[in-house]
Amino acid sequence: MPSPRAAAVPLSDVVAVAAVVLFGVLPFPDELFRARGLLLVIALVPVVVIPLRRRLPLVALGVSLACTVAVALAGTLAPSALVAVMITAFSVADRTRRSLGLVCVAAAALVVFFVSAVPLDGELFDSRAVQFVTFIVLAGALGDATRSRREAIAAVTERAERAEQGREDEARRRVVEERVRIARDLHDVVAHQISVISLSAGVASSSLESRPERAREALTTIRSASRTVLADIGGLMALLRADDDGERPDLRPQAGLDQLDALVRRFADAGLHVELRREPVLVALSPACDHVAYLAVQEGLTNAHKHGGGDRAVVDVRAGDGALALTITSPLRAEDADAPSSGHGLRGLRERVASVRGRATTSDTDGEFRLEITLPAETSVQSAGGRGQR
């Protein structure tokens, strides 16, 4: 059973059909406009195709124009057929391409102009015929304006939808970037300290009975690392919860190469023997590059502590060609001769290095894993005098 909505007839179709029928049955005083009998039936035929003028505008115009021509050749100007031509001319201009619509409307106007001369005894420029032609041209112009307005609204709507989609895509991209940033920061904050805790727990477990003092030192390291990681996580959570317009939490300054000695000492306390080779004069780094350099050393030593063999690593810090070069070398375990170099920590480190226009490479040769970082320097030079080598 068809739904009421599907069976409903548009009000405009009812009005159009009513107008054609009304102009067909009105008792015009001029006999020229009165169609009777078969001519009236022909003049009213367009009411059949008028409801189809949206889907088949050219067919509707052709039928209406053919009825007009047929009645005119019989010596009558049927207003009902001419009104049908006006209505369908509007639909052609509204529902077809602009060029095609203009050609069809112009052709219909010319046909009506010339065929009207038959019942008017050859008078082409009779005011009555000119009026009908003018109304057809006006209907075509209104149809073209309606089509242009609809296309303009559609274009504006499409642009608005594209802009909205672009905003949604940008929002999704920012969410993904923020997740990656949070994951990277969380790794930087947690991974090193958790590694220290894990290895120190192993030392404490193995030394508890044979070397109690070593176990106590390991437990002290675990306590210190636990406090540090809890403080760092708390600071990161406070930063994430802070409102943009509210007060920012008090956070510690980002670590740089000036804290490199303290970083080496923490790894030494955890059982990793680090040899630090540093030139006395280093190039100056921007704050962002300085922090990335610190994170690079931390990541390299963490990997050496977790995956390396021999509990030792070498950190080489040198300057050259307007850049700072960092190299962290550590031996590999025998079973890890082909250790992977694409973990989440190294992947995040590469992204951080790339963000400051640096370069990060890894290599695995002769049983050693090597992490090499190159960071761009500023124009000035800073001295590392007074910083001892270990």
Image (cartoon, helix red, strand yellow):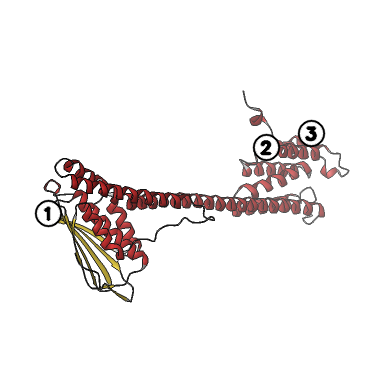
Q: Please tell me how crowded label 2 is: few (under 14), some (14-19), or many (20+) other residues with Cα within 10 Å.
A: many
The residue closer to the viewer here, 361 or 37, is: 361
Q: Residue at x 69, y 36 (%)?
A: 10
Q: Nearer the viewer, mark 1 or mark 3?
A: 1
Residue 367, which numbered label? 1
**Above/below status of 382 relative to 112:** below
Q: Which mark is residue 51?
A: 2
Residue 79: x, y in percent? 78, 44
Q: Nearer the viewer, residue 65 or 286?
A: 286
Left or right placement of residue 79 versus residue 365 in this view: right
Q: Quadrant of residue 293?
A: bottom left
Q: Position of residue 171 (x, y in %)?
A: 48, 51
* Residue that carries the numbered disc 3 in the rendered image: 37
- Dot placed on the residue nearer the N-terminal end, 2 or 3: 3
Contact (CB < 8 A) between labels 1 and 3? no
Q: Judging from the image, what secondary structure is the residue with disc 1 in?
A: loop
| Number of numbered discs | 3
Binning the other alpha carbons within 10 Å of mark 1 as few (below 14), some (14 to 19) or many (20 upward) gives: some
Q: Where in the figure is residue 86, as x and y percent of width and height? A: 72, 47
Proximity of marks 1 and 2: CB atoms separated by less than 8 Å: no
- State the CA–CA distance, disc 1 to disc 3: 108 Å
Q: Which amino acid lies under the numbered mark 3 shown in the image of this protein?
A: Gly
The amino acid sitting under disc 2 is Pro
**Residue depicted at 66% across the width and 44% down the height:** 61
In the image, residue 356 lies at what x, y percent?
Answer: 35, 64
Q: Between label 1 and label 2, give the one nearer the viewer.
A: 1
Give left or right: position of 238 versus 259: right
Q: For this rendering, which residue is in front, 94 or 192?
A: 192
* Quadrant of the image containing the N terminus: top right
| Residue 35 in view (yes/no) | no
